[in-house]
């Protein structure tokens, strides 16, 4: 088992997207591209958010390209 990777936790509102609570703001494409490169390199990503219920479902359905 290879344990040589980074774990990156990233907040949603105001970080992955420019906040427009409770709607989705515009995506932070520069950060998303960086995170996708990190994932492709074998690093682990964690979505860190205080959203719950319907607000969280909207985010999860939108996926990385929201």
Image (cartoon, rainbow, N blue to C red):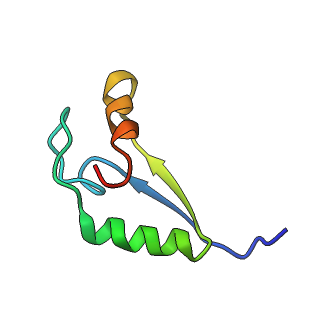
Q: Is residue 47 above or below residue 29?
A: above
Residue at left 44%, top 68%?
36
Residue at left 40%, top 39%?
60
- Locate residue 57, reporting x and y percent: 38, 30
Where residue 53 sits, quadrant-wise, is: top left
- Locate residue 66, reporting x and y percent: 28, 49
- Locate residue 21, reporting x and y percent: 18, 36
Q: Is 31 left, or right, of 38 in this rendering?
A: left
Which quadrant does the N terminus fall into?
bottom right
Residue occupying the far top of the picture = 53
Q: How many marks?
A: 0
Residue at left 76%, top 70%?
3
- Locate residue 43, reporting x and y percent: 59, 69
Residue at left 38%, top 37%?
61
Q: Is 43 left, or right, of 28 in this rendering?
A: right
Q: Is residue 40 above or below residue 53?
A: below
Q: Between residue 29 and residue 16, name the one nearer to us.
A: 29
């Amino acid at each position: 088992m290879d344990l040589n990777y980074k774990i990156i936790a990233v907040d949603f509102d105001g970080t992955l997207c420019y906040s427009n609570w409770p709607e989705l703001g515009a995506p932070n494409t520069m950060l998303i591209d960086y995170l996708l490169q990190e994932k492709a390199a074998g690093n682990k990503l964690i979505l860190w958010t205080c959203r719950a219920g319907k607000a969280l479902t909207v985010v999860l359905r939108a996926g990385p390209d929201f």
